[in-house]
Image (cartoon, helix red, strand yellow):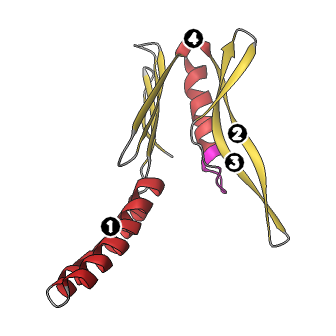
Amino acid sequence: MKIKRNTPDIFVAEEVPWLIAIMLILFIFAFVAPGVGMAFDGFWQGLLFALAGGGMGFAALCVFVERLQVILDRRSGLITLRRRTVLKYEQQNVPLDAFVRAETEETTSRKDGRTRQLYRPTLVLADEGGEARYPVTQVYSSGGSADRLVKAINRWHAQTT
């Protein structure tokens, strides 16, 4: 995730998978354009080609392209987690006063006899029974982006507490 704003009043981090979105749109056009052209020769074959290939591309676009935002706002006193896909929009608000810290969750992936560590950023909030965890993203990934985001959130939170 990329940090879009980091001021004393607001912290905004966002992820938009532009490359995947563009590739999937090109995939859709790669089937729809020839399918329309083939429809002039054999209507059903061209239509089937366009709908099947374009439909698969559109389904992948709906599943794999998701805009994520995490917003910590001192003025409103809220933490906002937003997820937007082609077909769905979700927003979750939690009080900023309940924020304890951000941390990196870790899991292990095993494939073909190899193991690798995967990470995702998580917000830890005070709850009646202790602490509750809210993952910023549902997907674990390799690399250091989760850790960089966690450190940036914790630095922002520590500035005025």
Q: Name the residue under label 1.
A: 25
Mark 2 neighbour density, 10 Å: few (under 14) some (14–19) many (20 or more) = some
Q: Mark 4 points at which residue?
A: 97
Tell me which residue sits at (66%, 24%) in the image: 101
Q: How far apart are marks 2 and 4 (CA)?
A: 20 Å
* Residues at marks 2 and 4 touching, judged by CB atoms closer than 8 Å: no
What is the chief secondary structure element of the magenta stretch?
loop
Which quadrant is home to the C terminus? top right
User: Of residues 104 and 135, which is closer to you in this image?
Assistant: 135
Q: Position of residue 118 (x, y in %)?
A: 71, 53
Q: Position of residue 139 (x, y in %)?
A: 61, 48
Which badge, 3 or 1, is on the more N-terminal residue? Answer: 1
Q: Mark 3 points at which residue?
A: 119
Q: In which quarter of the image is residue 88?
A: top left
Q: Mark 2 points at which residue?
A: 104
Q: What residue type is labelled 2?
A: Thr
**Comparing labels 3 and 1, the label whose residue is closer to the camera:** 1
**Comparing labels 2 and 1, the label whose residue is closer to the camera:** 1
Q: Distance between the residues labelled 3 and 4?
A: 26 Å
Which badge, 2 or 3, is on the more N-terminal residue? Answer: 2
Outermost residue, right side: 113
Which badge, 3 or 4, is on the more N-terminal residue? Answer: 4
* Residues at marks 3 and 4 touching, judged by CB atoms closer than 8 Å: no
Which badge, 2 or 1, is on the more N-terminal residue? Answer: 1
Q: What residue type is labelled 4?
A: Asp
